Each structure stands twice: as C-alpha cells, then as structure tokens.
Image (cartoon, rainbow, N blue to C red):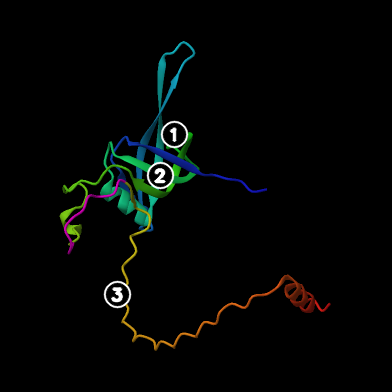
Amino acid sequence: MRSINKVILIGNLTRDPEMRQTPNGQNVVTFGIATNREWVTKDGRKQNSAEFHDLVAWAKLADICHQYLKKGKLVYVEGYLKTRSWDTPEGVKKFRTEIVVQDMIMLDKRTDGPDFLPEENAIEMDEPAQEAPEETTMQDPAPKEKPAAKEKPAAKEEPAAKEEPAKQVTPAESKLDIDSDLGL
C-alpha cells in the first residue's frame, strides 16, 4: 500500500533563516512560517487563527533560503513532515516535527535594493531591466540560453508537381472500387 507525506504551505516568515553546518560540512537552514485561517461563525462573526510551522532546508536550497529570505516575506514551500527526537542532558526525550523543504518560491515582488541581490552576486544585464515576475522559483536555476545555431544553406526546392483535375466518379464506379478493394 502506498502512502503520502506531502506538505504545501503559503505563509509569511516568522523569523530570519538561521544557517548551521552539520559535522560533515552539510549546510542546513531553519526558519519558521505562519499560516492564517479565517472563517465566519454561525452568528456572522469573523474568526482568525494562526498556525506556526518549523521548516528546515538542506544543501543548495539552504544557501538560497539563507541568502534571500527575511522575516515577513511571503513564500510558497513544498516538502514533507519529519519528526526527530533527542535526549536532553537531564535525560528527557524530546521530539520535534518539522517540514523538510524540497521546493521554495518567493511570492513577494522582487525589490531592486541590496536586500534582494547582494552586490557581490549582482548580475550584469545587457538589456534594460524589466518589471520582475510575481513568482520566483528558487529550487532550479533558470535554464541557460543555448548559442544560436549556425544557419544552414537553403535546401534546393523541387519543382511542384502539376495538378490534374479531379476525376468525376459515378456512384456505380465508386461501389465497384470499394468492392475490388475488399476482394469482392
């Protein structure tokens, strides 16, 4: 029997991402997001509820999250639930359930300031800047453009076949053609 462990959230960061490294040198970043839910009660009053989620990202995605995400930013995250446990120095077993992020999309519009693209990572553009898209995916880098293919010489054109007028077929001849095709 198959099972599914998938989480999709859209929310605002509750704190700046915190970067750490594992003993073997792997980058890991932790951060939190809040999601809001609104509903109307039977008597017509609006109710709000906030839920807080702990997230963890690894490797290159951890670097990207640490570099570009800040408290308050709106993000889309996709991942799975993971519960880990450890023993405190007092011997108490602790548990923590986190969302391991596999994909992240920043939903806030880009800004032209240094908060979005630090100077040491600035990209030089040949064309004038255009308005940024509303969504930016951070899992896969943008595909690189391939160099223009060399132009092939034009193929020789063959003379067009002369068109003959369509032959008029009577219903009797048509039936005979069909019968002969079927072997009758």
Which quadrant of the structure image shows residue 77? Answer: top left
Q: Residues within 10 Å of mark 2 (few under 14, many from 20)?
A: many
Task: Identify the mark nearer the N-term, 2 or 3.
Answer: 2
Q: Is residue 163 visible?
A: yes
Q: Which mark is residue 147?
A: 3
First to last magenta residue range: 125-134
Q: Which mark is residue 67?
A: none
Which quadrant of the structure image shows residue 151? Answer: bottom left
Which quadrant of the structure image shows residue 158? Answer: bottom left
How many discs mark residues in the rendered view? 3
Q: On the rendered image, what quadrant is the C terminus found in? A: bottom right
* Residue tagged 1: 90
Is residue 170 shown left or right of residue 28? Answer: right
**Majority secondary structure of the magenta segment?**
loop
In the figure, 19 relative to 41: above or below?
A: below
Q: Nearer the viewer, residue 45 or 99?
A: 45
Task: Identify the mark nearer the N-term, 1 or 3.
Answer: 1
Closest to the camera, between mark 2 and mark 3, is: 3
* Residue tagged 2: 77
Considering the numbered disc 1 on the image, is that residue within a helix, a strand or a loop?
Answer: loop
- Residue 65, percent from left and from top: 32, 48
Q: Residues within 10 Å of mark 1 (few under 14, many from 20)?
A: few
Q: Nearer the viewer, residue 132 or 118?
A: 132
Residue at left 16%, top 49%?
Answer: 114
Amino acid at dot 2:
Val
Residue at left 30%, top 75%?
Answer: 148
Considering the numbered disc 2 on the image, is that residue within a helix, a strand or a loop?
Answer: strand
